[in-house]
Each structure stands twice: as C-alpha cells, then as structure tokens.
Amino acid sequence: MTQAQETKVILPQLIVGLGNPEPKYDKTRHNIGFEVVDALANAWQLPWQQHKRFQGWLLEKSGPHGKRYLLKPSTYMNNSGQAVRAVTDWYKIAPQSVLVIYDEMDLPVGRLRLRLSGSAGGHNGIKSIIAHLGTQDFPRLRLGIGKAPADKPTISHVLGKFAPQEAQTIALVLDLAIAAVEVSFKEGVEKAMNLYNTRSAEE
C-alpha cells in the first residue's frame, strides 16, 4: 500500500472547538464551536480538565480506534493556535488528525460544512491555528451563524446570542455536528462530508 493510500482515510484524533473563554461569551454565535465539543463531552459523560500546559480544557476518551481528545482553548479566539500546538506537540498528533469546529457567517443557521483543508477565510481563530501548525491542511467543521443584518455591525452579530426563534434549529444542528464527528471517528472525514454536507437542521 502506498503512503497516499494509507493517508486517504482521515480519522481525527483531536477535536477542537473554538470560542472565547469568558462567561459573557457563552451561547454567542462565535462560541458555537465550544457548544459542539461541550455537547460531545456530555454525550460521552466525561468531565473537562483544565490544563495550564495546554492553555485550555481537555478531555480524552479511549475507544476501539485509539484515544480521542476534545479541546477548548482558554486563550481568546485570536490565539487559539497556541493551545492547539501545545496539545499536538505533547501527544504527537499530526495536523491532518486535528478537526477544528467553528462558526461560519457565509452559511445560514442550521447548515454545516466539513472540509479537509483550506484557507482561514477571514476567521481569526483559524488564522492562528494555521500559523502555529505551519499548514492549512487540517480538517474543519463549520457551523452556520448567518450573515449580519445590514443595519448591524459584524462584530455585534458575531458576539451576539442566537435569536429565541433559532434555538430549536441550533439544538438540531448540534445533534448533526455530533453525528458528523462520530462518523469521522469511525469512517473518516470524507465519509462524514458525503453524509452531512448536504444536510440541514431544518429538514
């Protein structure tokens, strides 16, 4: 088997949810990455442990495909790469095995998109991770937060909370995201892309 064939199926080892650490940012659009990994931790019934070494909260789960890690950086969003690099260095995890979950304004609320690699697309958390890992070749899962209304500054939209009428859609898309991550663990990111990139929480 060639090296290209061996690396074709990408099974994530580290799942990183992006967000800002202070309570005032809880449940904001920019923190939806935190919400996904919190929901995964809940589903696994495992507690977060804060680690100064990793500049974040980490948990690990052992399973048939080896150990899996969840990470919430305790740095601010713009410095997320520091925590990701600390964990990947410590556990010897390749960038291709790091799945990063974050918010995406170019997707409507209720939609998600998996990609194997790509540019930061203006997202400062991803810019930081690319800078610290030295590559943009790592998979990512983007969850739609919708564009800012014409009369609202982008930063206010991103750091604002979802509207009450969006609550049910958010709950459903979190379930979809968990399912996509679980499939990526067992069958690879590309399989999860095929199954979930066309799905919507409102279907």
Image (cartoon, helix red, strand yellow):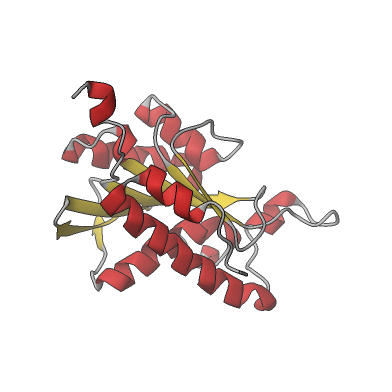
Q: Quadrant of residue 4?
A: top left
Q: Is residue 26 above or below residue 84?
A: below
Residue at left 56%, top 69%? Answer: 170
- Is residue 189 left or right of 6 when viewed as pictured? right
Residue that protrudes farthest toward the top in the picture: 2
Residue at left 60%, top 72%? Answer: 169
Q: Position of residue 94 (x, y in %)?
A: 26, 33
Residue at left 55%, top 59%? Answer: 199
Quadrant that contains the C terminus: bottom right
Q: Position of residue 122 (x, y in %)?
A: 61, 36
Q: Quadrant of residue 53?
A: top left
Quadrant that contains the N terminus: top left
Whether residue 76 is visible here, answered yes or no, is: no
Q: Is residue 89 above or below residue 185?
A: above
Q: Position of residue 9 (x, y in %)?
A: 30, 38
Residue at left 84%, top 53%? Answer: 150
